[in-house]
Image (cartoon, grey):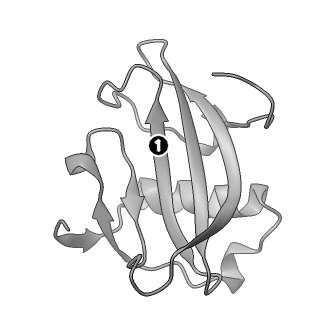
Amino acid sequence: MNERRTIREQEMTLVRHLLTLAGKNPDEINIPTQVEEYEGGKMGSINFTDFDKAPYLNDLVQVKYIDSDGTPVVITLTQNTENEILDMDFWKKDFSKLLLYPTPETVAVKDPNEMI
C-alpha cells in the first residue's frame, strides 16, 4: 500500500458532487480526509478506506468525462460493506495519465449500457 495523504480540494469537490448524483447528501456522509493514491496517482484513483476493514459492496455512481486529450474516462465512486466510501476509481480508456482533473461541470452520469 502507498502512503496516505490529505485529500485535495478538487478531489473533495468531485466526491461531494458524485455523492449528490448518487442521491446522497454529502453533508450526512463521513468523507475521510486521508486517502491513498492508486498507481502513484497516474489516473487519479484514490482509496478512502482499507479494503481489509470492509470489502467492496457496490458502485454508488459512475460518471463519464473526456480528458483534455479527447480520451474518455469513467469515474466510479464505490462503497464498502460498512456503507463507507471505499474508493473513487478512474479508468482512462487508453490507460494513459490523466491530464486535467475533472470538475462537477465536466462529468455526466454514465448510462450503464453505454460502452466507452
Residue that protrudes farthest toward the left in the picture: 3
The residue where tag 1 is placed is 90
The location of residue 6, given as percent across then percent down, is 29, 72
The residue sitting at 48% across, 63% down in the picture is 87
User: Which residue shows up at 26% across the image and 39% down it?
Assistant: 42
Q: Nearer the viewer, residue 113 or 104?
A: 113
| Mark 1 element type | strand
Image x and y of residue 46, in percent: 38, 58
Indicate the position of residue 53 as horizontal and vertical percent values: 43, 87
| Residue 65, above or below 35 | above
Q: Position of residue 116 (x, y in %)?
A: 63, 22
Residue 2 position by quadrant: bottom left
- Give the residue at x 76% y 26%: 114
- Residue 27, compared with residue 90, is above or below; it is below
Picture quadrant of residue 105: top right
Residue type (three-letter) at the residue carrying disc 1: Phe
Left or right placement of residue 7 versus residue 3 in this view: right
